[in-house]
Amino acid sequence: MSQISLTFPDGNSRDYDAGVTAADVAAGISNSLAKKAISATVNGQHWDLQWPITEDASIAIHTMKDEVQANELVRHDLAHIMARAVQELWPDVKVTIGPVIKDGWYYDFDREEPFTPEDLGEIEKKMKEIINLRDPVKTEVWDRDVAIKYYEDRGEPYKVELIESIPGDEPLRMYWHGDWQDLCRGPHLQHTGQVPADAFKLMSVAGAYWRGDSSRAMLQRIYGVAFTGKEKLKAHLTMLEEAAKRDHRRLGREMELFHMQEEAPGQIFWHPNGWTIYTELQDYMRRQQRAGGYVEVNTPQVVNRKLWEASGHWANYQDNMFIVEVDEDHAREKTVNALKPMNCPCHVQVFNHGLKSYRDLPLRMAEFGSCARYEPSGALHGIMRVRGFTQDDGHIFCTEDQIESETARFIAFLSKVYADLGFHDWTIKLSTRPEKRIGSDESWDIVEKALGDACKAAGYDFEILEGEGAFYGPKLEFTLTDAIGRNWQCGTLQVDPNLPERLDASYIGQDGDKHRPVMLHRATLGSFERFIGILIEEHAGKLPIWLAPRQVVVASIVSDADDYVLEVVEALKARGVRAEADLRNEKINYKVREHSLGKVPYILACGMKEVEERTVSTRRLGEKQTKTQTLDEIVAQLAGEATPPDLRQDAPAELAAE
RNA sequence: GCUGCUGUAGCUCAGAGGUAGAGCACUCCCUUGGUAAGGGAGAGGUCGAGAGUUCAAUUCUCUCCAGCAGCACCA
């Protein structure tokens, strides 16, 4: 038998018979490692302990201490254990697939009756029994025909379909957890007892389409989360609770920011508090865009279908548009219109009005454009996914040569905005040509390269999303990470030579001929509505003071201080601070509690002592400690702190120390 | 849009085949209290909408609407 050489992480190597398994290798090292081992990495590939190794390779044996591998195996084995538990409880249930996902796994089942929450409890119990059996996990490679016949005989049509979709040259691997069998590419643990029985939880059950195809059967998907230890599960569940506490729908209600009601599904009734955040953010963006060389425009909401036909939206996007037919009794002429789902066609109309010269390019046109999209009902989510929203939209009309510099310029713009808004952790993704596309390969080459080079020139790395571009051009997506680790795609930049063509945009070049400009669609926040949702969740409602709807509440401790409280409020308002008086007949404890829950950044309490000394007792949100400050001092301080970040440097000199 | 669940006072929720209840919030009264809930009284609901079964429906059935979770969608 031939020999192979295996190299260990410490650099040492040893010879083994070809076909040796990682389990044999571990056993050769020590008894305890043989027991503790869960898998190996062989030549960089995650490797089942049972798989034979047939050539020289690097090898590392993993134990539960190797978090990455351990998590994957635990979750993967739990998927099988759950499927086994379900089939032991309900033998008629058909199994499909069960992959590992972030923090856990899911498994899709075909079963007549839905699983109930009580069912989940039973399944969990059964899973723990299976874990305690410490059944060995075994694996074999099967012939295709044998596997298909096996599943046909067992009445598992989904498995048959799966096997049929696996390329013919790939070996089909079977795994057993005890007597229960599943098709699986592995790797898996040594035995079910290696799964920690106290570090997983079944979370929910929901419908999911077979193979993600909405025209196919709806299966029932059970989600679970699992970790390598009990404490980690607990930490995860705590994080979920934290996320629930931050839910912008709940905070929006509690902080009286907005509401929604069934007469206008997917649209927002902004209340004074919420609208303050909105306008503050919009004012900020407007200043940034002016400084960034944009001209601002505003275009119609209700636009005749002729324009949408010309732009291509009527053919490709109609299902998502609100169609507005004007009644003949009320109008001179019956017309069919649509609420604009996007601003771009209207911006081209502005561009087309009057002759444009190459000297006008790049022309950066911005609009806080109110758009309406008929989103599928199931897609709606608070103010994050709505049917009526406003984009911080912009279109840059430029030449192909200017794409790179304009892209670099936009990245710098976006970077400043995100930093001002407190987001320092964000990434760029470059989506390249999809299969279904227009335009020549040469022009795709040029434009994709321009986007990539612009990122590099701006000093940013990017990830490539192969084939994810729009049919007309590649795009950059800007994704930020929030305080609890969630990712939100907000900014975007898309290259579009198509729409100028369709809507016949042109400029006069240096040569005196007409040329076609390229359009860059770009947005920084995406939509104000969604971005405000993100901000609310990012800060758990405790917004930075410049965005906080109510920045200061001045509360009287005794009613004899009321006049002074009003004077303090006026002094703050005169400096542009959003201040309110609370003169209600309540104890200071009550007022502090209420405004703390309302996330007001500052509470200034005034009793007779403050009246006599012309001071206030300052309490910052979340701090127990209060501080006595003179009226002048607190007014100057708050006027400084409440200034938007982009205006800070212009703040009066007295605030420079802030 | 699909599957499942849900819809009772402004909010959070309880309840039953015989036309409703709690806490908080709200209004009024007492209380002027020093940093996360002082006390008392009062007002407030076509039980999501429509139809059906029934002597009787908010409760049971059906349809619709909306919300929640997931899936699909997000040219």
Image: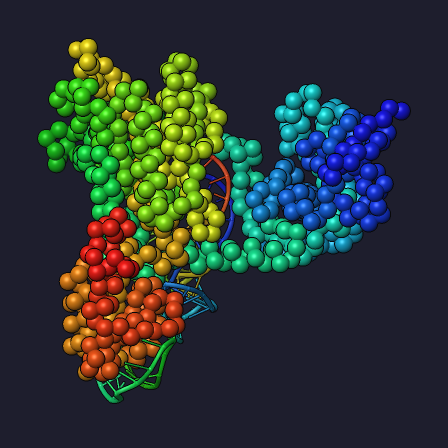
Q: How is the image coloured?
A: rainbow
Q: How many numbered discs?
A: 0
State the quadrant of the N terminus of chain A.
top right
Closer to the camera, A30 or A480? A30
Relative to A517, say whether A594 is above or below: below
Q: Toward which corner of the image does residue A564 lie, by quadrant?
A: bottom left
Q: Does A230 sit left or right of A400 as displayed?
A: right
Q: Give the camera-side residue of A88 and A83.
A: A83
Q: Name the spot of residue A547 as percent of width and height, x first.
A: 28, 54
Instruction: Decide: is B22 above or below A166.
Output: below
Residue B10 sits in which quadrant? bottom left
Do we see residue A136 in this rendering? yes
Identify whether A386 is placed above or below A259.
above
> Relative to A127, is A632 on the left or the right?
left
Residue A306 visible in the snapshot: no
Q: Position of residue A245 (x, y in %)?
A: 44, 59
Give left or right: position of B50 versus A297.
right
Rendered position, A118 above or below A93? below
Give the camera-side residue of A151 and A454: A454
Q: Residue at x 84, y 31 (%)?
A: A15
Residue farthest left in this picture: A332
Picture coordinates of residue A512, whole percent (x, y) = 17, 11
Judged left or right of residue A114, residue A70 is: right
Residue placed most toward the observer, A374 or B53: A374
Q: For the point 22% across and 64% down, which residue is it?
A: A636
Residue A293, position as x, y percentages in the image:
22, 34
Q: Residue at x 30, y 45 (%)?
A: A528
- Indicate the quadrant containing the C terminus of chain A: top left, top right, bottom left or bottom right: bottom left
Residue furthest right as drawn: A1
**Residue A94 image-quadrant placement:** top right
**Which residue lies at the image location 84% right of the left edge and 46% below the top edge?**
A30
